[in-house]
C-alpha cells in the first residue's frame, strides 16, 4: 500500500472521524435515536480514522487520486 493521502487530507479525515464517533453519544440529535444512523456514523467514523492512520484510501487508488507529495 503506497501512501496516497496528504497531510491536510489526513487531518480532515481524523477530525471528521472523531466528530462522527462522538455525534451519536453527545449531540442529542433526534437523528441518532435510530440504531441505523448510529451504526452508520460509527462505522464511517472508524473508516475515516483508519484511512487517516494508514495514509491510504482504497477509493483514491481506484480513481487515481493522490493528495500526498512523493
Image (cartoon, rainbow, N blue to C red):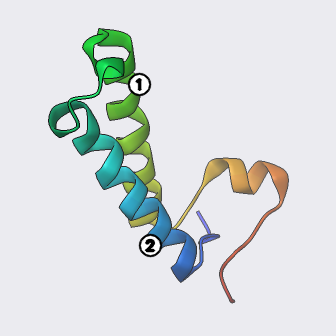
Other-residue count near label 2 (Cα within 10 Å), few / some / many at <14 / 14–19 / ≥20:
some
Q: Is residue 31 left or right of residue 55?
A: left
Residue at image x 29%, y 27%? 29
Above or below 51: residue 37: above
- Real-space Cα separation, disc 2 to disc 1, in angstroms: 21 Å
Q: Which residue does the numbered mark 2 point to in the structure image?
A: 11
Residue at image x 35%, y 43%? 20
Above or below 55: residue 59: above
Above or below 25: residue 45: below
Above or below 26: residue 49: below
Callout 2–callout 1 Cβ contact below 8 Å: no
Q: In this view, does 7 lie to the left or right of 58?
A: left
Q: Identify the image quadrant of the N terminus.
A: bottom right
Q: In which quarter of the image is residue 57?
A: bottom right
Of helix, strand and loop, which one carries label 2? helix
Q: Residue furthest right?
A: 64
Q: Identify the image quadrant of the C terminus.
A: bottom right
Of helix, strand and loop, which one carries label 1? helix
Question: In the drawing, what numbered circle is on residue 32?
Answer: none
Mark 2 or 1 closer to N-term? 2
The x and y percentages for residue 4 are 64, 70
Q: Is residue 64 left or right of residue 27?
A: right
Q: Which residue lies furthest to the bottom in this view?
A: 70
Q: Which residue does the numbered mark 1 point to in the structure image?
A: 40
Other-residue count near label 1 (Cα within 10 Å), few / some / many at <14 / 14–19 / ≥20:
some
Amino acid at each position: 500500500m503506497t501512501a496516497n493521502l496528504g497531510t491536510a487530507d489526513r487531518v480532515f479525515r481524523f477530525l471528521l472521524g472523531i466528530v462522527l464517533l462522538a455525534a451519536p453519544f453527545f449531540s442529542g440529535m433526534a437523528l441518532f435515536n435510530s440504531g441505523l444512523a448510529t451504526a452508520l456514523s460509527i462505522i464511517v467514523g472508524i473508516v475515516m480514522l483508519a484511512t487517516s492512520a494508514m495514509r491510504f484510501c482504497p477509493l483514491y487508488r481506484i480513481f487515481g487520486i493522490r493528495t500526498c507529495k512523493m
